Amino acid sequence: MATAVRTALGMGVAALTALMLAPPDAHAATSAGDPVHHPSASPAPSATPSAGPSASPSASPSPSPSPSASPSPALTPSDVRTRTYAYGSHARQIMDVWWHTAGPRRPAVFVIHGGWWSGGDKKYMTSISRSYSQLGYTVVNLDYRLSGDAAWPAQRTDVLTAVNAVRRHAAMFNTDPDRYVLVGFSAGGHLATAVGAYGDGRPGLRGVVGISPPVSPLSAFADGSVFGSKEQQKLRKAAIRLAGGCTPAKCPRVWSSMEVPFHASAGDPPMLTIHSSEEFVPPYQSEILKESLESVGVQMTVKTMAGTQHSAPLYREPGVAETVQAWIIARLGRAAA
């Protein structure tokens, strides 16, 4: 894997790559402020009602969650409930949960928005969330702390905490805690794959999907030099901000923690990533992760579409959503729509 990373980043940063590879993963994660491999129980969703699905949660989550918003019957079938819950005390630690009250417990799809780690909002994922609810799944569309709120690994920790909260309250959401997938877009795809490669696999996680995911912030840093495109230079700055304003040379352990290919292990779930051939997050980033995962026996599929579309616009290209849905169904099974 080290050879692949050096090839991707170029010989000009080979020394940096060697530095990044030096600390063992466990030591690097602990030094970066990461949670232990088995995070402690996450806070229960907030019981305080909100004025609507995008309202901020109360500061003190309670152990018995209750709805924070009324469902929209015009948009959902009669057996579907949609509510917003807090899974932490920060204003962005909230999630919209779509669940079916009738029938057996459903597998879950967690949707993670993009936005350069510094912006974006779950509201932009509403139509995609609805589509998976219509397929019969429980859907969790979540917000997380942005890089301006907290540096890495806060974003990955938030996804882990939201997943733990839903699994802990699986009976309330009529969902199966041992069958779920993560679907992330752009920066959200980085978070989804980072959770997939966290520790030696997460309980119940059956697969991870990334749409244009920058799984290799080190590659983004190298590509975003003065010779990179405007978008690549923006991504480089965004990755530095995610790392707390620190460059790889100054904070190698933080960047090692952010670099998903460094953390592949045999217990990780299968992954699917999709890129455009000419977008600013190039497919070779996913190829680095694919090599790393397959070296420990984990299957990964990397698909490349012609063009320059990135993230949600790429997902809306003909056949992409259908490809992702078929891949998810193969891992979760069909749910009664």
Image (cartoon, grey):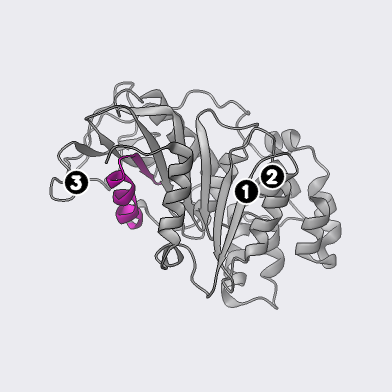
Labels 1 and 2 touching (C-beta < 8 A): yes
Q: Residue 62: x percent and y percent?
A: 32, 24
Q: Residue at x 49, y 57 (%)?
A: 118
Give the residue type that dot 1 points to.
Met
**Alpha-carbon neighbours of circle 3 within 10 Å: few (<14), some, or many (≥20)?**
some
Q: Residue at x 13, y 50 (%)?
A: 74
**Stretch in magenta:** 124-143
Labels 2 and 3 touching (C-beta < 8 A): no
Give the residue type that dot 3 points to.
Thr
Provide the residue designation for mark 2: 293
Q: How far apart are marks 3 and 1 (CA)?
A: 34 Å
Q: Residue 296: x percent and y percent?
A: 73, 39
Question: Residue 262, labelled with which disc?
Answer: none
Q: Based on the displayed image, in which of its 4 quarters is residue 133 positioned? A: top left
Q: Residue 80: x percent and y percent?
A: 21, 38
Q: Which of 101 and 254 is in front in this view?
A: 101
Helix, strand or loop at label 1? It is strand
222 left or right, relative to 162: right
Residue 141 among those drawn in magenta? yes
Q: Based on the displayed image, in which of its 4 quarters is residue 3 positioned? A: bottom right
**Alpha-carbon neighbours of circle 1 within 10 Å: few (<14), some, or many (≥20)?**
many
Question: Residue 76, labelled with which disc?
Answer: 3
197 left or right, relative to 42: right
Provide the residue designation for mark 1: 300
Helix, strand or loop at label 2? It is helix
Q: Which of 276 and 32 is in front in this view?
A: 276
Give the residue type that dot 2 points to.
Leu
Q: Can residue 147 be seen in this view?
A: no
Q: Which of marks 3 and 1 is nearer the N terminus?
A: 3
Q: Earlier in the sequence, mark 1 or mark 2?
A: 2
Q: Which residue is drawn at 62% across and 54% down?
A: 215
